Image: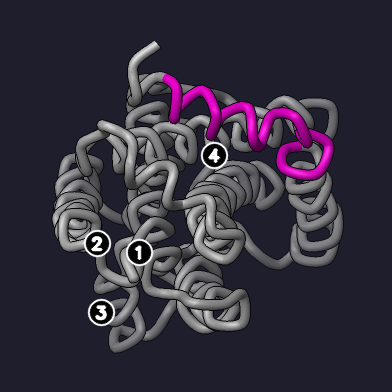
Amino acid sequence: MTGFPTLLYKEVLRFWKVGFQTVAAPVLSALLYLVVFGHALAAHVQAFPGVSYAQFLVPGLAMMAMLQNAFANSSSSIIQSKITGNIVFILLAPIAPAEIFAAYLLAAVARGIAVGLGVFVATLWIVPVPVEHPLWAFAFAAVGSALLAALGIIAGIWSEKFDQLAAFQNFLVMPLTFLAGVFYSVRSLPPFWQSVSRLNPFFYAVDGFRYGFFGQSDVAPWASIAFASGAFAALSWLALHLLRRGYKLRH
């Protein structure tokens, strides 16, 4: 095997070997969100016509799980390799920066989609959810996971210890995820906060993914995929730039 498929295999195996922790645990967390919020707010919220609140929640929770786990996969792998020192074996191997980036990215996307699929399957016995546009749903699952995977690579490279990575996740990823319309439609917000929400690239991933299920969304799916893809391209360029420079990787 050449460098790229070997590194990709290693990264996929890394999360799959502990699937109970990396896949099953996030699925359980999403189920708990669905049970608690779906029961507490079902009688008070109807985001889309003809869609119950519990149904509305399922795509949002699945996308939230995908975003958070894609970020966690790439960021934790890089920071662990830096702290343990084995990042040197990747840097010394004849692997181009683009191949390193692609391996970490694809492995994180694989974990994100696996978790998202697990959430969807696990929720079927609680609330059935239609899938009116499966290609749109898959497209946003891939773009959303890739967006956070690229951000995770940047966070892993920038962080020098786990505390810094935790701060990155707690003060950036978590707030942007929760404020991306997972639990509500942005149409229910005042005009100012609707405008603020539209600056959040995570919102477009969540809203577009929800369109794949119900054929309804707050923003046209073409606009959402364009905005999310643009954000992914910008983060990918930055991550590749840092890898080529060896920023905080070569001492």
Residue designated by label 3 = 195
Residue 47 seen in the figure? no
Between 179 and 89, the one nearer to me in the picture: 89
Q: Earlier in the sequence, mark 4 or mark 2?
A: 4
Q: Earlier in the sequence, mark 4 or mark 1?
A: 4
- Compute the Cα span from label 2 to label 1: 5 Å
- Compute the Cα span from label 4 to label 3: 28 Å
Callout 4 touching callout 3 (CB < 8 Å): no
User: Which residue is painted at 26% across and 53% down in the image?
Assistant: 219
Q: Which residues are magenta?
A: 6-23
User: Which residue is painted at 19% across and 52% down in the image?
Assistant: 240
Amino acid on which the number 4 mark rests in the picture: Gly
Residue designated by label 1 = 249
User: Which residue is painted at 72% across and 43% down in the image?
Assistant: 22
- Mark 3 against mark 2, which lies toward the viewer? 2
Question: Which mark is drawn over residue 246?
Answer: 2
Amino acid on which the number 3 mark rests in the picture: Ser
